[in-house]
Image: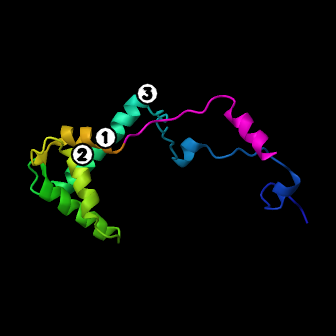
C-alpha cells in the first residue's frame, strides 16, 4: 500500500502544524463589562440619618392612604393594624398610641415626612459601633 498526501492516513505519519481557529474567523466578539463601581462610603452619622429617612419614607408610603403627604392618627393606627395582621401578631393599640404620641408631640393630628423622621429618631435611637483594635485579641483569649 502506498501512502501519499492524498490519503487520510498520511496526516498521522506526516505531522503538519495546526493553527487554532481565530476568534475573528469564527465571528465571535467579546464586549468588555464596565468596571465594578465601589459603593460610596458614608460617615456613621450619614448612615444613621439615611436609616431614619428610609423609615420615614416607608411609613409615609404605607400609612398615607389618601396620598396627601400627611399621615393622620387614624391612618397611622390603621397602618399599624394592617402590619400586625400581615405579621400574624396581635395589634397592640396601647403601644401604637405611645408611638403616635412620639411622632406627633404637639398633638396636631397629622404629621409630614420631616416630623415622621424626627419622631423615628426619638423612637428608634440608632448608633453605629466600632470595635477597637484589641477586641479580636481579647475575644480569642476568652475562647482559650
Which residue in the protein does label 3 denote?
43
Is any atom of residue 24 visible in this view? yes
Q: Are marks 3 and 2 in contact (CB under 8 Å)?
A: no
Q: Is residue 135 magenta?
A: yes
Report x, y in % for residue 28: 52, 47
**In the image, which is nearer the foreground, mark 3 or mark 2?**
2
Residue under circle 2?
102
Magenta residues, as a range? 125-144
- Crowding at dot 1, Cα within 10 Å, few <14 / some 14-19 / many 20+, comes out as few
The answer to the question of whether label 1 and label 2 lie on touching residues, with beta carbons closer than 8 A, is yes
In x, y percent, where is residue 125? 38, 40
Q: Answer left or right for 62 relative to 18.
A: left
- How far is disc 1 from disc 2 in space, using C-alphas? 7 Å
Distance between mark 3 and mark 1 Cα atoms = 20 Å
In the structure shown, which secondary structural element does the residue marked by tag 2 occupy? helix
Q: Residue at x 29, y 70 (%)?
A: 85
Sequence-wise, the earlier of marks 3 and 1 is: 3
Residue at 48%, 39% (x, y): give it: 33
Amino acid at each position: 500500500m502506498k501512502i501519499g498526501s492524498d490519503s487520510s492516513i498520511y496526516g498521522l505519519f506526516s505531522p503538519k502544524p495546526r493553527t487554532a481557529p481565530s476568534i475573528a474567523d469564527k465571528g465571535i466578539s467579546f464586549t468588555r463589562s464596565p468596571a465594578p463601581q465601589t459603593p460610596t462610603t458614608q460617615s456613621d452619622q450619614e448612615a444613621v440619618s439615611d436609616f431614619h429617612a428610609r423609615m420615614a419614607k416607608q411609613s409615609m408610603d404605607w400609612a398615607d392612604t389618601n396620598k396627601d403627604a400627611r399621615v393622620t392618627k387614624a391612618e397611622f393606627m390603621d397602618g399599624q393594624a394592617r402590619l400586625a395582621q400581615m405579621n400574624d401578631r396581635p395589634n397592640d393599640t396601647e403601644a401604637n398610641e405611645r408611638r403616635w404620641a412620639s411622632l406627633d408631640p404637639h398633638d396636631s393630628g397629622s404629621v409630614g415626612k420631616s416630623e415622621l423622621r424626627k419622631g423615628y429618631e426619638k423612637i428608634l435611637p440608632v448608633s453605629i459601633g466600632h470595635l477597637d483594635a484589641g477586641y479580636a485579641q481579647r475575644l480569642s483569649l476568652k475562647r482559650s
